[in-house]
Image (cartoon, rainbow, N blue to C red):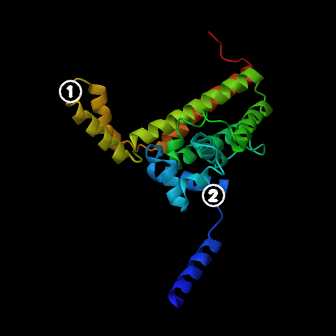
Amino acid sequence: MATQNLSRQMATQKVATREPLSTARILQAAVALADEAGLGAFSMRGLAQELGVVPMALYKHVANKEELLDGMVDIVFGEIELPSGELDWKSAMRRRATSTREALKRHSWAIGMMESRRPGPANLRNHDAMIGCLRGAGFPFEMAIHAYSVQDAYIYGFALQERDLAFETSDSAGQAARRRSESIGGLEDYPHLAEVASKLPESGYDNAVEFAWGLDLILGGLDRLRHAGVAPASS
């Protein structure tokens, strides 16, 4: 009897000290689970198991999986540094772009979902600050929209390529190039690709450098358009 009472007391204490279930706790656990396993293996049942609750308990805080995904993406937006009015616009854009790339490296499951989910507060703050920075720098409205669009297209596209290529150093880039050449039976008929495979390992390839190079190219072009005061011609 004494043993049963002790077990009951321990169980009661465990329940009492367990962190209460909340929307914020569910979302943080969901992000961590997606980071670890990807969305392909993600499920509400698995999330409930991770939290130590029954699946139905989740639905007291999130209506469904779609609402959960909306909240998860908004957490990613919340990790992105907002453009600061204390910096010149190009420095602010560069820092925001780098911060976005780093967030997507941490949460690669979110690539392709950033602009497709129902926007939450962090998403809205990000977009508002971005447009505000560009407008404050003197970009006319239409040009500001073009400038925003081209930057995010580049950032998201680079993040997708970086995830799919899955290499971080010149050595791993060279190994990937060699594996690709072997998979298609050699590169004798493709001399320029053969050069890439042979020279890439010694070129000092670095994803961060590549990202910064392309971003500076975009920002430089936008700055010239800003001074000229003309938006890109529409077809």
Q: Quadrant of the C terminus?
A: top right
Check disc 2 and give the amino acid type: Arg
Q: Which of 85 and 109 is in front in this view?
A: 109
Above or below, comparing residue 62 to residue 199 in the picture: below
Check disc 1 and give the amino acid type: Glu
- Residue 25 is labelled as 2
Q: Is residue 55 visible?
A: yes
**Mark 2 or 1: the one toward you:** 2
As drawn, is 225 to the left or to the right of 215?
A: right
**SS state under label 1:** loop
As drawn, is 144 to the left or to the right of 170?
A: right
Q: Is residue 33 visible?
A: no
Residue at mark 1: 188
**SS state under label 2:** helix
- Where is residue 52 shown, x and y percent of the image? 53, 62
Residue 22 placement: quadrant: bottom right
Above or below, comparing residue 155 to residue 18 in the picture: above
Farthest residue, direction bottom: 2
Q: Nearer the viewer, residue 79 or 201?
A: 79
- Where is residue 186 shown, x and y percent of the image? 21, 31
